[in-house]
Image (cartoon, rainbow, N blue to C red):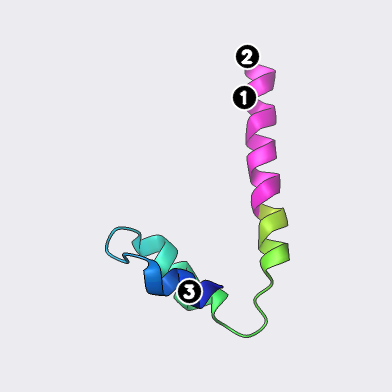
Amino acid sequence: MAETILRQLHADEYPHLAEMIIEHALKPGYDYAEEFEFGLDLILDGLERLRSTA
């Protein structure tokens, strides 16, 4: 999947995404599920903080 995204990606428009794909997602042992859970936790924590300050 990462290779497909990288081929279609305009790296000059999204340099950080291109770097993440090359440096992490294409490496052996990269676990998409683990990254998803981490990212989801960050988003949910941020939403909780926003909700508690409103």
Q: Point out residue 53 in the picture as x, y percentages from the top left corner.
A: 64, 17
Q: Residues within 10 Å of mark 1 (few under 14, many from 20)?
A: few
Q: Point out residue 17 in the picture as x, y percentages from the top left corner.
A: 43, 62
Residue at the extreme left: 12
- Under circle 3, the secondary element is helix
Q: Is residue 43 magenta?
A: yes
Q: Residues within 10 Å of mark 2 (few under 14, many from 20)?
A: few
Which of disc 1 and disc 3 is earlier in sequence? 3
Left or right of residue 7, residue 29 in this image: right
Q: What is the number of the mark on residue 50?
A: 1
Q: How crowded is mark 3: few (under 14 residues within 10 Å), some or many (20 or more)?
A: few
Determine which residue is flagged by label 2: 54
Which of disc 2 and disc 3 is earlier in sequence? 3
Q: Does the magenta stretch include residue 15?
A: no
Residue at position x 34%, y 63% in the image: 15
Above or below, 37 against 3 in this view is above
Left or right of residue 38, residue 7 in this image: left
Q: What is the number of the mark on residue 4?
A: 3
Q: How far apart are marks 2 and 1 (CA)?
A: 6 Å
Left or right of residue 53, residue 11 in this image: left
The range drawn in magenta is 39-54
Q: Contact, CB < 8 Å: mark 3 with mark 1?
A: no
